[in-house]
Amino acid sequence: MSNKSSLADELALRYDYSSDLVELLLNYFDYARLESILASLKSPSKYYSFRVNTLKISSEALLQSLRERGFQVYFHPKIEEALLVEVEGPFDIPLLSKVVVVDKFAAESVMQGAQLYAPGVLSAHGVFEGDEVSIVDERGRVVAIGVAVMNGLEMVERGRGLAVRVSLSRYKSISLRELDEYSSGLIYEQSIPAMLTSLILSPSPGEVIVDMCAAPGGKTSHMAQLMGNTGRIYAFDNSKTRIVKLAENVNRLGVKNVVVIHGDSRYINVDYPNLKADRVLIDPPCSALGVRPKLFERKSRFDVFSCMNYQKQFFRAAVEVLKPGGVIVYSTCTLTFEENELIVDFVLNNYPLELDEQPIYLGSHGLKVSKCGLLQRFYPDVHGTPGYFIARFVRI
C-alpha cells in the first residue's frame, strides 16, 4: 500500500469518509490541511446566517425587531442584507435508554437545534408518545434529546408530522422557521457564500436572468431583491419535488418577477430558442462536500466524477442563451478540484467565455489553474463558512 493510500485510510477512518474520496482530496490538500478541513466540517459554521428579504423590510428594521425580542443578532460586515447569530456549543448530550435513529440529513439538522419530523426517522423501537428519547444518527452518535410526540411505530409508518420535540441539541442557534418573520417572508436561511453568489452575478433592475438550477429558490429570490422585483428571472429546475418548494418560497417572499419552469435547463437553447438572457446562474447539483455539519460522508471518487461530467453539460445551453457581453456565474458547495477549477478550464477551452473579476472577494483564491486569482473559494477551517466555490465569466 502506498504512503498516500495509508494516509487516506487513516483520515477516512477518523472522519468516517470513503478512503478513495479522501485519497482524491489528498491530490490537492496535504495531510494536515485536509485534516483541518474535515475536522471543521464536523461542526456547524461559527455564525448562523440568514438573509433579510428587503422586498418586505429593511435590514435595520428586522435587526431591531429581533433584538427587542431578545435575540443576539448582528449585521454582516460586508453584506448589508445578511444577519448573523452566533452558534452555541458543542454541548454534551446523554444517551438515554430509549432511542430514535434518524437518517443523515435529519441528524445533521437536529444537531443544530431543528425539530425532528417523521420523514427522517429510520427506527424508534419501544418508543411511546411522551417518552424522553435520545436522537442518534445511523452510526449511533447522539445529536439531541427530546420528547416523542407520537409512538415510534407511527413515526416510521405515518412518515409525516412532528416526531420528537427537541429539548437539547449538540449545537444551538436561532430557530428561524418557528418565527413569524419567517412565515411572513421577511427571512431566508442562507450561507454567506451563497448570498455572495447572487451579488457576484450582479443582476440589475429590468434585466433578463436565467437561473438554471433554481430550487429551492435562495439565489432566485435574492436576485429578485437585487432587481427590485423588476425584469424577469426564468427559474428552471428538473425536480418535481424541488420545484414545488421553489414556488412556495417565491410566494412566501413576495417575489413577482420570477417565472418558475419545471424542465431540464441543459436544453433551454432548444426548448426556448427565443430566450436571450443578460445573465445566467449555474449552481448545479454537486458532491456537496462543503456542506456542514457533516457527521459522515458516503460519497466516493465515482460520485465526484459523475457530478463533474453532469456539471459540464449546462454550459452549452447557457452560452447559447446568453447575450454577447453577458455574464455567467458558476458556483458549487463542494471542495473538489474536479468540480471547480477543472470545470473552469473545460469552459475556457470550449466556449467563447473568459474569466471576469468578481466584484466582491471574501474568500481565498482558486487552486493551481491559469488566472486562479480571479476565482473564489471558501474553506470551513479558514473562513468559518461552508466549503464553496464561485467563478464569474463574461461572454466574448
Image (spheres, rainbow, N blue to C red):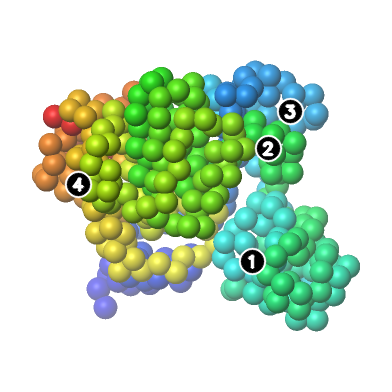
* Front position among marks 2 and 1: 2
Q: Can residue 341 be seen in this view?
A: no
Q: In which quarter of the image is residue 12?
A: bottom left
- Distance (Cα) linking label 1 and label 3: 30 Å
Residue named by callout 1: 120
* Residue 173 relative to residue 280: left or right: right
Residue pictured at 40% horizontal, 70% vertical:
18
* Neighbourhood count class around disc 3 (C-alpha, 10 Å): few under 14, some 14–19, many 20 upward: some
How many numbered tags mark residues here?
4
Say which mark, if any, is on residue 66. 3
Q: Are the residues flagged by discs 4 and 3 in contact, CB closer than 8 Å?
A: no
First along the sequence among labels 4 and 3: 3
Q: Which image quarter is the N terminus in?
A: bottom left
Q: Quadrant of residue 9?
A: bottom left
Residue pictured at 71% horizontal, 60% vertical:
116
Front-most of 105 and 248? 248
Residue named by callout 2: 182
- Distance (Cα) linking label 2 and label 4: 37 Å
Residue pictured at 70% horizontal, 76% vertical:
157
Q: Are the residues flagged by discs 4 and 1 in contact, CB closer than 8 Å?
A: no
* Neighbourhood count class around disc 1 (C-alpha, 10 Å): few under 14, some 14–19, many 20 upward: many
Q: Where is residue 225 in the image (x, y as percent from the top left)?
A: 50, 26
Residue type at the position of mark 3: Leu
First along the sequence among labels 4 and 1: 1
Say which mark, if any, is on residue 324. none
Q: Position of residue 203 (x, y in %)?
A: 37, 25
- Distance (Cα) linking label 4 and label 3: 45 Å
Task: State whether residue 352 is above or below residue 213.
Answer: above
- Distance (Cα) linking label 3 and label 2: 12 Å
First along the sequence among labels 1 and 3: 3
Residue type at the position of mark 2: Tyr
